[in-house]
Amino acid sequence: MFNLVRNWYREKFSDPQAVTLAVILLVGFAVIYFYGSLIMPLLVAVVFAYMLESPVGWMTRQGIPRTLSASLVLVLFAGLMLVATFGLLPALWRQGVALATELPSMVSQWQNLIMTLPEQYPTLIDEHQLASLMANFNNSLLSTGQNLVSQSLSSLVDLVALMVYAILVPLLMFFFLKDKDELMSSFGRFIPDNRDLAKQVWGEMNVQIGNYIRGKVIEILIIGTASYLTFFFMDLRYAALLGALVGLSVLIPYIGATVVTVPVALVGFFQWGISPEFGYLMLAYGIIQAIDGNVLVPLLFSEAVNLHPVAIIVAVLIFGGLWGFWGVFFAIPLATLVKAVVNAWPSHQPVTDTE
């Protein structure tokens, strides 16, 4: 057993490049895991800087100084965020409050429909078991509602942190965009010289993460807008809120689309019941999801779709459990990072013990 472990260590870590890469990965993981909450403004600024690097780089190549390019792009981005905040969020808030008010009656209507199933199929569905299941569901729903209220009250304390973020994040974004090369050079001084393998992996991931963030933003905008227009022209209630939810659901591959189907179907059923309009709604919603999965995702994430769906779901569960929202958001690039490290890791012939 000892010889087996020693031979494996010699095979995988005999190359100093591999040791450097392993140390960088372990240190990076430890810093984010243990100090992620402290450096969260820094991480958020890095994400937005990645997203805005493409237009800044394009303007720089056109001869515009990088400082001016970063300033113009940041001002335009801030303007769009203000328009979205004061133009879109109030409407979403009003529809969210109205939906929360009507949600108990919607759930009750669904339950009344389900409770008629034992009469229609007495040999397949037991009435007492179904009643017990509905009671458990009601208790779970009540507990969830109480937790949401308590979390909403406790989140008021986070308003101060949000105000700090609103100041720090734009400043960090500006300096990341303006002094990108200088910051990268300064950071490189803390990494050992034998880092060619790490540079190879980083070069691949740098491109993929930037493309992933920009692609994910484009996907959210397209799917959210298409869903809103579809719901609006079908005269579905809460069209803006449901469209925003469908757009944001693409953040969580596979799971998000499944979860957001529930409110769409619930609102449609409550509004129209079992009718042709309800069928048209679910058909249109299914077409949007099919276009997203079969057209947009391959176009925007040509590298990411090489991952098996099981690998993506496992990555969402693991990284989401470790880092919450950002772990879910970066589940695909993190899974791609693991794949890139495995593929780039030097492999030698096993060393056999001749003693």
Image (cartoon, grey):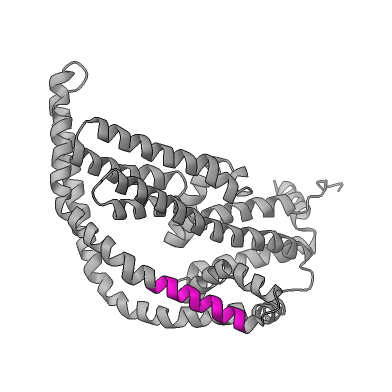
Q: Nearer the viewer, residue 155 or 239?
A: 239
Residue visible at 28% across and 46% down? 263
Q: Give above or below for 62 relative to 205.
A: below
Is the magenta region chiefly helix, strand or loop? helix
Give the magenta part as a residue range.
Answer: 68-82
Q: Is residue 95 left or right of residue 310?
A: left
Q: Is residue 121 left or right of residue 42?
A: left
Task: Kindly indicate the quadrant of the structure image that contains residue 84.
Answer: bottom left
Report the label total: 0
Q: Residue 129: in sight, yes or no?
A: yes
Q: Nearer the viewer, residue 148 or 173?
A: 173
Q: List the single residue furthest toward the front.
A: 233
Q: Give above or below for 77 relative to 215.
A: below
Q: Residue 249: in sight, yes or no?
A: no
Residue visible at 52% across and 77% down? 74
Q: Is residue 86 left or right of residue 313?
A: left
Say if the magenta span includes residue 72: yes
Q: Give above or below for 176 relative to 282.
A: below
Provide residue 52's location: percent of width, then percent of height. Answer: 56, 70
Q: List the single residue furthest toward the right.
A: 354
Q: Nearer the viewer, residue 213 or 29?
A: 213
Provide residue 17's location: percent of width, then percent of height. Answer: 77, 63
Residue visible at 80% across and 60% down? 15
Q: Nearer the viewer, residue 128 or 352?
A: 128
| On-image quarter of the N terminus | top right
Task: Kindly indicate the quadrant of the structure image that contains residue 289.
Answer: top left
Provide residue 250's location: percent of width, then percent of height. Answer: 44, 50
Provide residue 144's location: percent of width, then percent of height. Answer: 22, 53
Q: List the single residue furthest toward the top.
A: 123
Say if the magenta span includes residue 77: yes
